[in-house]
Image (spheres, rainbow, N blue to C red):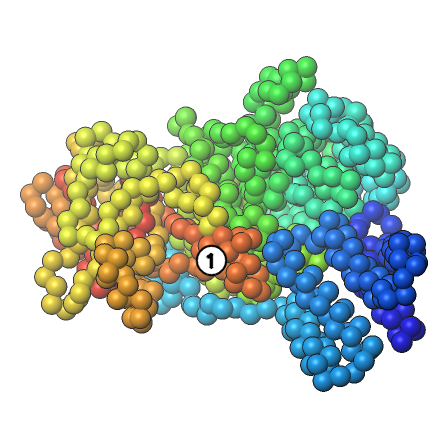
Amino acid sequence: MKNRLLSFIILVSLIFYGIVGYHFLTGWHPIVMMFIGIILGLLINLAVYGLLNLLVKSSHKIPVKFITAICSGIIGFIVLKLFGFGWPTLFFSAVAALGILFCISLYLFLRKKTFLSSLFFGLMLIGVGYILFVLATPGADPYDKEVPLAFSEADNFSIAEVVLDNPAAIGSYKVKTFTYGSGTDEQREEFASGVTYKTNSVNGKWLIPDWKRKKRKWRERYWGFGAENFPLNGRVYMPEGEGPFPLTLIVHGNHSMIDYSDDGYGYLGNLLASRGIIGVSVDENFLNAHWSGDFMGKEMPARAWLLLKHLEQWNNWNSETGHELTGKIDMDNIMLVGHSRGGEAVSIAAAYNKLPYFPDEAKEKFNFNYNIKGVVALAPTDYRYNRQIILKDINYLSIQGSYDADEVSFWGMRPYRRLQYTDSISRFKSGVYIHHANHGQFNTTWGNSDFGAPTKWLLNLAPLLKEEEQQETAKVFVSAFAEATLKNKQGYRAIFKNVAVAKQWLPVEHYLTHYESSNLKSIADFEEDLDITTAKDSTRIQAMDVALWKEQILTTRDKNSQENSGVILGWDYEDSKSSAKKGVYEVSLSNAATSLFSLESSLQITLGAGNHEWLDVNLTEEEKEKKKDDEKRKVPQLDFTIQLTDILDQTVAIKVSEVKGIPKPLKSRFTKFKFLDKEMIGDDWEIQLQTYHFPLPIFTSKNADFNIEQIKSLKFIFDQTAYGVVVVDEIGVSGF
């Protein structure tokens, strides 16, 4: 018995403390850390055993070994919670309680094999086995995939008019790779003796005042440098040829600083270089998380500033007489690409680029003013930096996955909406929402788990796009954006207007795309006031025979703000066949709005599916009670009619689906347990809109007598489904 109990105690130590050690990243090998954890566990066990013997040495009735085993398990779980598990407290406590009960049952079973002890042990074994089984599986997709409407046969977008090459195809340029950096990096050979060009360090002490105490001590011990001498390290993908070539900097986000992130964007760097664009993956790993601490966003200015210092270095090489890179770089065509916190950093860098001083500390003078033409934010953060960044006069693209367990909402749409165009140059901005894409797979080294172990064991990985598929989507959209932004190949904008243009190059999936050009003329954006019957200028709005009509700020799945207002419209007909009246939402145009329409323009509307259950707001409590036992209504496949009327009352109408379908709400199950999703993430979906462009010749082809330049109103007529809810945002007119 004694030996069995001793073995049990040792096993507890091996499991609990070994897990802690293995996942406690210090720079030492995980196996070494695991053994350190095991030794720590054994020492704790001995200490507990010795302390208990001192306390109860006069009594022989107290089972010291039994209590030691229980205390050891409890201490092990506490250590795990503090240093290893980011699980929700309630769930972790339940699992810990199950583990402790299992320990008790095992002890009782080994002590005396009775029916009750055997039953107790058997039940606990089943419970523990079930938990371990669930944690070991990849999960399951609770929501059946549907063929994306954007790629359906019903999509009538005239893609024949768009002739494009696959932007994700390898180009004609041979690519050479090399690194540049300090030449003295203590941890990475590629930035030490492996560099092709040495760079001077830069002083970032004013940019990151939080570089202090434990964070400073252990980082400087590991890296061999501090904030006063940050290195400029980069991994270059260079097209062979005379040049000059446009320049793109790519920067990673937050990850373990000792699990290097910069080599994870080679697939983008190689692609861009093969198509005649220099790609540089920037090393900022020394700013990332570590066991000694995370800067929690206070390092964002440094992330952004370092990008500009890299541009400064490239500009120096380009203008330096006799340098191998002299004249190779087109400094008038620069693009920044960032992932995660890097996705926010590139926006900050673009904003800093025009400033004379660091806004948080004027002792740091800025002198950049480079021609940054485009910013790409992959699954970005927003407001990690405590300032609201408002970009101006730049092309912008943000890409987000619906299964991003790190940044669970499309934060990249907030800077999209804040972006301002103040000049006459033709520019554009876009957002792409990819169903079943996660956070980490935009980087080839981060993998399909958006959390590190052991938290990653909770993640539902089964629904995810394959890594190569997700990266293929990034290649298509990032490269198309680069071609349009850096090479003025404006035809690639069509991909962001309607993703069906690129359907032959993309995995079959749902893609929601926003697109807005700088020539958009807004009619209604629902931001101006509290009056739901008014829009810009003297445009008037009314709704008839609808079940739901309200304007509100749209929220994320965790009830945060999307920083965007929209109008929510719902209709509900008891009998769609016999119902004579259909719901109508009418926008009566002002003279200024009427003048915007011509045959060379498009009606632009941003919209998406709402939740049809919101219609229950019209029910009384009694009606809601009666409805509880009813079979839930299916999620409708939304469609409706858009009708234009001119001053002579001539009308033309098309269905939304004639241009692009309206996808149903895209639901996600991030974890293997539904209740955990609610606690850790929030709702299983959030309102995600997309932009629809209706070329006005489509309308005029329906009625030759219709005068497109004398439109007095547009109507949404909800005549295609018996019930539904639609969310509408921007209504305006833009060029093709």
Coordinates of residue 67 in the picture (x, y in percent):
82, 62
| Residue 626: quadrant of the picture | bottom left
| Residue that appears at 55% across and 70% down | 140
- 164 sits to left or right of 273: left
- 318 sits to left or right of 397: right
Q: Quadrant of the C terminus?
A: top left
- Residue located farthest toward the bottom when viewing the structure as drawn: 115
| Residue that appears at 52% across and 30% down | 389
| Residue that appears at 72% across and 85% down | 115
Answer yes or no: is residue 250 visible. Answer: no
Looking at the image, how many numbered discs can be counted on the residues? 1
- 646 sits to left or right of 86: left
Most foreground residue, 135 or 580: 135
Coordinates of residue 712 in the picture (x, y in percent):
14, 40
Question: Residue at label 1?
Answer: 684
| Residue that appears at 90% across and 69% down | 6
Most foreground residue, 523 or 199: 523
- Residue located farthest toward the left when viewing the structure as drawn: 648
Coordinates of residue 251 in the picture (x, y in percent):
66, 41
- Residue located farthest toward the front when viewing the structure as drawn: 58
Q: Amino acid at mark 1?
A: Asp
Q: Quadrant of the N terminus?
A: bottom right
Answer yes or no: is residue 186 visible. Answer: yes
Coordinates of residue 5 in the picture (x, y in percent):
87, 71
Residue 652 vertical placement versus 369 (above, below): below
Residue 426 vertical placement versus 578 (above, below): above
Most foreground residue, 694 or 161: 694
